[in-house]
Every structure is written in structure tokens, then in C-alpha cells.
Amino acid sequence: MVSKALVAASTRPMILSILRGGENYGYQIIQRVKEISGGKLEWADGMLYPVLHRLEKDGLVTTQWKLYEGRMRKYYKITEAGKKELAEERKQWLSVHKVFLELWKPIPSFE
Amino acid sequence: MFDLEENINNWKKSLHKNPSLEEGYIEELESHLRDLIENFTSKGMNEEEAFEKAKNKMGEVENIGAEFFKTDTKNISGRPTWKSPVWMPELIWSYFKSASRNLKRNFGFASINILGLAISIACGMVILFYVINELSYESSFENSDSIYRIVNTRIQNDKLNKSARTPVPFGPSLKFNLPEIRESARFWRAFLPVIGRVTNYFDNEKIYFADKTALKIFNFNFISGNPASALDNPSSVILTQSLANKLFGNENPIGQSIEYRGYPAGDLKLLVTAIIKDLPDNTHLDFSALISLSGVNTEKDNWGSFKPIWTYVLLPPKANVSFLEKKINNYTQNHFSTNSSKINFSLEKINNIHLYSDFKGGFKAPGSITNVYLFSAIGILILLIGCANFINLSTSRTLTRSREVGVRKVLGAGKKQLIYQFQIESLIIFSISAVVGLLLFEVIRPFISEITGADYSLNFLFQNGIFIYLILFGVLISILSALYPSIILSNFNPINALKQKIFTGKERNSLRYSLVVFQFTVTIFLITSAVILNDQLDYIFNKKLGFNKNNIVVVPYSKNFDGFKNNLLSNSSISNLAVSSRVPVNDVGYDGRMVSVEGTGDKVHVQNYLINSGFTSTYNIKIIAGRNLREDSEFDKASLLINETAVKKLGYSSPQEALGKKIYWDSENYGTIIGVVNDFFTTSFHEEIPPVVMHTNYSREYWKTFISIKIKSKNISNTLALIKNSWKIFNPDNAYNYFFIDESLAQLHQEDEKFRDSFNYLSVLAVFVACLGLFGLISFITNKRKKEIGIRKVFGSSSISITLLLLKKIFISLFISACIAVPFTYFLNQKWLSDFSYRITINAGMFLISFGIVILIALLTTAYRVIKAALSNPVDSIRYE
């Protein structure tokens, strides 16, 4: 399981990354994360929505209600600002990633 | 049947309650929930399971709402405005303010509340001190874990006789023969000792003779002198600081000489070798001077004489005590050739002496663990009564405070905050009570110290962190007692609270009545116990002693007794004189013997009295068969007087039958029974009257210890002066000393008196505190039923019927309490009484007396409020409706 703090930190970039592939709605976003992480990343589903609304408020996504099989769904779509934000986030995560890759190389030493 | 739509609707409603969730948000969440449900049902779950699982997966509504709020607000703390803050230190000041305003406004109630608690706290403190002091006995000695006192048990006629007295040669010979014993030391209590120098003599000091090894066993607190050698010299004496001050003032006492006179040893000139600090109160040892035992000639004292000598031994740590006891008994068998199987020695840890020992004779009158438990229980009960009061009085104020609660709630106070507020208020009341209680304790401390003899200084509090524990305990009690009132108050519906429509049902009173039942139960228990206790002590104090205790003065034996006697008897104010080895108010000169009965060979343990012929007439002891000893001569040297108990124990069917029978002291010496006297008490009323054998050995001096003088009651001080003057004629160089038999008897039962006093005082206080609680309850009830009473009066109820109506429940509570109190009062008192050899039986009358008292107290407590309510003008109470 991924720790709560890490989940909280990574939620925004993950949502933005998923939306990069086209507009999507809450339920699908969660399903995607679950799929990719193999169930290791779990959110209380309801907690996704406050984050999505925050993204919308910050202008990183736009929304649209659509009728689908008789039910209203709210679709989220990434904006230019969102993409920029994602690129920035990505740069940061990759630099962290790079540090870890370096740190976790096999070390020539004996115990 | 599970209805999915209905459940989803209900779920949505719960979302609507959250102010952060707007319509659109909820629709989105609902859509999500439905997706989840579809997903789960497609996996084969039924609708109900799927709904439950989906609902869980969505998370707590509360949290979702809080997150949405954070998203939508610019507020930094992220706390929604409609939620009260968890931590608002600003409010504490306001709590203090409202608490102090409340105290001021309800001054009467607050003072009852505080007074009740303060009294409870003061009582609790007294009892705590008593218990701590009792439990700390012997803690001042380093080796206290390995010091033992040797005690003995005799089994005789299937009855145990336990004593701490040991034969004179016992201690030294044990140490000599049993290598396991590291040290052994004897303490021998001096009787009627006088100690002093030049013109400064004291006859009221506790003086003991001790082996020098005593200083190796007990580490007394030496101020000056050498602990290793202080008792080496036969004439050396160790003084306590207070006695040294009395004798020498500012002079240095070391190396000075003082004089002693008393039994044993007679007259001695002593050299002060050391000064020790006064013994602490919490040790069973008790002396102000310790004289070297090597100065006493003990050659004549053999294994058969059990003197008031106590033998203490120091064992190695972790010694095998039961094994050692066996060895001691094997060894002592040699010395009790004929009756060895009947005397069994055992070792008693000194830590246990004060509270657990039932071996008779010792330095001090022992305490008792039963009393420690008993007083602890009373202390806890009084504290509980105090808390019950507090709960009753606090909840009874709810009516007047409901408006305040309503306003606070409307202005946004949460339930938690109200609970905090009332907790802080209770803490303030408890703190004030604690301070008042401590002051009260300080005021009564000197009296308590006088009753108990222990010095209860408040320094006690600061040792071992007791203070911290007390504060924690106080806070805990405060929180627990405020729990119920604060929950009740904080639960009010603000609308009802503002309209003052708080109490609609009956159920609210059940706790209050249970508390009153509890208080009454304790009250009945305490009052009944006090009645029984006082009856029992009166009974034994007034029990037929078997002798006349009045107007008998005892003085030390005088040289030329016949001359002294004739001198005194020539005066009309003196009617009789007697010499004896013992007087029946203490165990000085105690002499226990195993005698065998002629013919049967039965061995019986008897107490031996050496007397002259005047003893029976001086003490007014009746001769019920045979004759008295002849006038003082050699004639009756082998004649015995025995008491009625001895007749039974020696196996004779009647006093007449006993006459002329022989009793053997050992295989060669015997005496012949010439008379039987009535039973008389020899020491404490707690002890059964033992078989007593009295005889004389007039030509010898060794046993002559006491002269008992029967005086005529008028002009006692002149008679006392007369006795002193004639005694001085015959004993010019010796210190004079006297005591009254009746005063000594009273002293003997001082512990019982202390117990009686303590119990009576505590009972009165407990009852008083309980009354305060009852007063609170009745005030509440009359207040609450004001309108009802008004309406009843309008419809024609009389004042009397209203009084009865108000008192009905009180009396029902009383009745329930009585039912609860009777069995366990009976049981506990029966247990207490079983300690006495001569005791009263508990009867219904005692309970009736206490019920009467309780009913009277209850009526007096409630009368004012009830009558005031019953007489009130209905117009006043129903005008506003």
C-alpha cells in the first residue's frame, strides 16, 4: 500500500496525467489508477471529487455535464494551463525519480 | 426486501445535511456511487451487498464535506464556520468568569457544595494519614525485613494462648546454640521505674533493660555516643533526646550519672553513654531510656518464668524461617521437659507486629489491620458521600442554568465545549473545597494527633510524591463527579432549554434517588455501627470486674512492710492494705506456670499471683469456698487460692470439690487448694479471664512488688500526702510513685476509647455531609414541582397532603436503604464483636434506634424546604403560565 502522504501528494499530477489522454469522469479516473497500480493505490472514492473541483477552480481542467445512458456524468478535460502544470509536475517528479535511481544503484561495499 | 433506490435516496439525504456539499457535488457523487454499485453487481453481488460496499468505498460524508470546504474556502485553518473549534484557550478565561459569577449568584448552594466536599476531603486526609502511618511501622529500621520477635503459643484445653513473653535465659542461649541466628537481644520492661538525678526525678518514663546486642539489631539514631559499645558496661544507659533534655537541660549528658529504681534490678547508679533521637511514632518499640541488661542479676530466673521480656533475633536475609522455628522448638524441648509439646515457639516478623500480631504483651498497644481496612472504607465512603452530594447539588442547579445552556448553544457552543465548561467549573469547586479541606485539616490536626498519638504533619504530603497522587486523584474524582451533570446539561435541546422545559419525564430523577439511597445506606450503617460500638464498650467497661476498682492506690513495695502498714492503718482514712506480685490492671509481674493436677496428671497453664492475706479484702474479691490465707505467716506457704475458672480448667466439678486437692508446680513441689475466689479480670477486657492460682511466700521478699492501699473516698489529696510521707519514712532514699487502679484500667482501654471517639466523630461528619446532599435534593424537588404544588393547592390540596406527597419518595428511599443496610451492618458488626471475649448480642433495638435517628435527621433536613413549599401561595408559582 502506498502511504497516505504520498497519495495526497501524487493525486493532482496523476489526475492531470490521466486527463492528458482525453476527457474523463471521476469513476473512470479512479478505475484507471487502480488498474495501473495493481490495487496498490487506493482512495476513498468520494475524496477524489474535492481534488477535481480544486483543479477546476485553479483553471487546470474544464468540466462538462453529459447525458450517458440516462445518467448525468460530469466530464473533466485538461486545459493548456493544466498541461503546463503537468509538465512542471512531471519535471519535478522525474528529478526526484532520478535521485532515487542514483541512490538505489548497487553499492560496492561489504556489510 | 432491500430497496436500492430508497437506500440511495437516504444516502443522498445524509449528504444534504452537510453544508459543504452542494447539489451538483451530490449528483456527481451519486453517479459515482451508482457506477460502483453496477460494477459490484456485475461481479455477482446482490444489491444490498453492493450498496453497502459502494457506500463504504465512497468514504465518510463528513470527510468529503470537509475536503470540499477546504477547496471552496479561503479560510486558512480549513475549519468550516458552522463547526466549533476543538481548542479555544481564549474561552478558559470566560469559563472561569462564568463559574465565579455562578458561585456568587448561588452562594448558598455553592457553600453547601464546597462545605460538604471540604469536610469529605478533610476526613479523607485524616484517614489517609492514619493509614499511611499505620502501614509504615518499623520502616525506620534498616534491617526491618530480617528482624523477628520470638513468640510462643500454648495449646491448652483446645484453646490457643498466644504470648510474646519469653523465658529470661531464652535469647542468649538461642544465639549460642543456633548458628543461623545472627544476633539475639532481649528487652525487659521496667516496672514502676523512677529515673533522675539530684532533685530532678521522673516516674512516668518508659524504661527498658536491653542486651548490648540490641544495638546491632536495631539501628537507633545516635546523636552522640558510640553505638557499638553504648551498652557494654553493666551500668550504662542510653537516653532519648527528650529525656536527656528533661534531665540535663543544656549540659552535656554523656558521662554523667543518674539513678534508677524499679523492678527488675532495684536501685542502680547509671552512667549515660549515649543519646539517641526520640523513637519515631511508627515503630512498636517505645522507650525513653535503655539500660544495659548485664547489670541485672538473672541467675535465679530459669526457663520456667515468662517475664515481660521480649526476645528479638536478627536472621540472615532470606533465612528459612519455618526450618529455623523447628530447630528452635527442638532445642527448647530440653528445657521444658514435661510439657514441651504444649509450648511452641515461632518467629514473627517485626514489620507485622503492629498490625497483624495477636500475641499478647508487647511494647505498645498494637494497631489492627481490621481498623486500617475499616477506616479506609469509612474514608472512601465519606468521599463518595461528598461526591454524591456534589452530583446531586450540581444537577439540581440545572433548572436555573438551562437558560444559560440554551443561550450558549444558540451562540454556537458545542456539546464538547459545554462539557469542558462544566468540568472546569467542577474543578474550580473541587479546588476551593480542597483548599478549605486542607485548612480544616490544619485546624483539626492537633486534636487528631492527640486522639491517635501520631504526629500528622503536612510535610507528610511532600514525601514519595503523595502530593502528586492526591492532585491526580482529586482531578479524577472531580472529572468523574462532574461527568453526569455536565452531560445532562450539555444534552439540552436549546429550544427546550430556553423555554425551561427541561424535565418532562420522571426518569431524570432515578440517579438522584439512587445517590440518596446510597447516602442513607451508609448513614444507617454508620449510625447503627456507632450504636453497637458504644453499647459494646459500655458493656465491657461496666462489666462486673470481679473486684472493686475504686479508691485503690498502688505504691511500690516498702521496706519494713509491717511498720509501713501499721503506720497507715492507724489513720482513719485508710481501710486496708495488701502486698502482691501483680495488680489486676497490667501484666507487670506476669507469671505463667504449667501446673499438673494431682491424680489425673493433666497439665494446665495458670497465672500465678503471689499475694498476702490482705489482697482479697483490699480488692473486695469474694471467697466463695474454703478460707482466705491466714494472717501473714509461714503457715500458709503451700496453700493455694484459685479462681472459678481455675476450678473448671483443673477439672473439678465444684469449688467445694477443689478444696484440699493438690497442684504440682513440678515433680517435687506442690500446693494444696484451701480456697476458691470469684473470677476477676486480670488485664484487658479483650482477654478472657484466665485460671489464676494465688499463694503466698511471706518470708521471702523477691515477689513483693506492689502495695495496694484501699482509701476512704473523702479528702483524697490529704490521704495521698499521708501515704507519701509514711512511705518516705521507711524508704528515705528511694523515689516514690503511685497510681490509681481505676485510672490504669481506663488507660488499658484507651485504644478502645480512641476507636470509639474516632468512629463517633467520623460517623457524625459522614451523616452531616449526607444531610447536605439530602437538602440539595429536596430543594431541587420542591423547586421543580413548584407549579404542580401550586395547581394542587388551587384544586384544594391541603398543606399536609402536599408535605406528605413531597416526603413520600424520601421515605421510600429510606426504606430501601434500610433494607440494604441491615444485612451488611449486621455482618460487619458481628465480625467486629467476635474480637471480644465478652460481648453483647446485636438486636433489633439497635437498628430501630438508628432508623429513628436517620428518620429524624431526614425530617429535620427536609422540613424547611418542604414546609415552605407546602405553605407557598399558589399565585406566586403559577402566575406566569
Image (cartoon, rainbow, N blue to C red):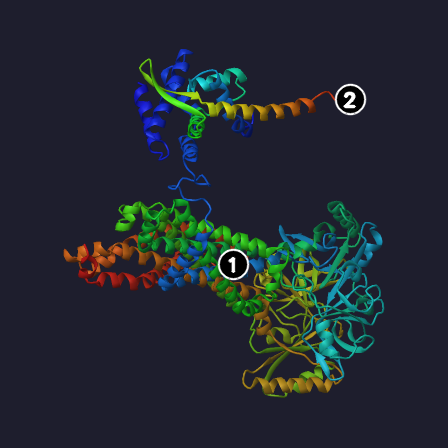
Q: Position of residue B683 (x, y in %)?
A: 61, 65
Q: Which residue is mark 1?
A: B124
Quarter of the figure that contains the C terminus of chain B:
bottom left
Above or below — where is A87 with respect to B441? above
Q: Residues within 10 Å of mark 2 (few under 14, many from 20)?
A: few
> Taking the image as drawn, is residue A6 in sight?
yes
Q: Position of residue A53 (x, y in %)?
A: 42, 28
> Chain under label 2?
A
Q: Report the amino acid beneath label 1.
A: Gly
Above or below — where is A109 with respect to B504? above
Q: Please tell me which residue lies in front, B848 or B342.
A: B848
State left or right for residue B181 relative to residue A90. right
For label 2, the SS is loop
Q: Position of residue B688 (x, y in %)?
A: 58, 60
CA distance separating discs 1 and 2: 72 Å
Q: Please tell me which residue lies in front, B376 or B792.
A: B792
Above or below — where is A53 with respect to B628? above
Quarter of the figure that contains the N terminus of chain B:
top left
Q: Which residue is mark 2?
A: A108
Q: Report the amino acid beneath label 2.
A: Pro
Residue B545, image quadrant: bottom right
Name the residue: 63% across, 74% down: B615
Name the residue: 57% across, 78% down: B551
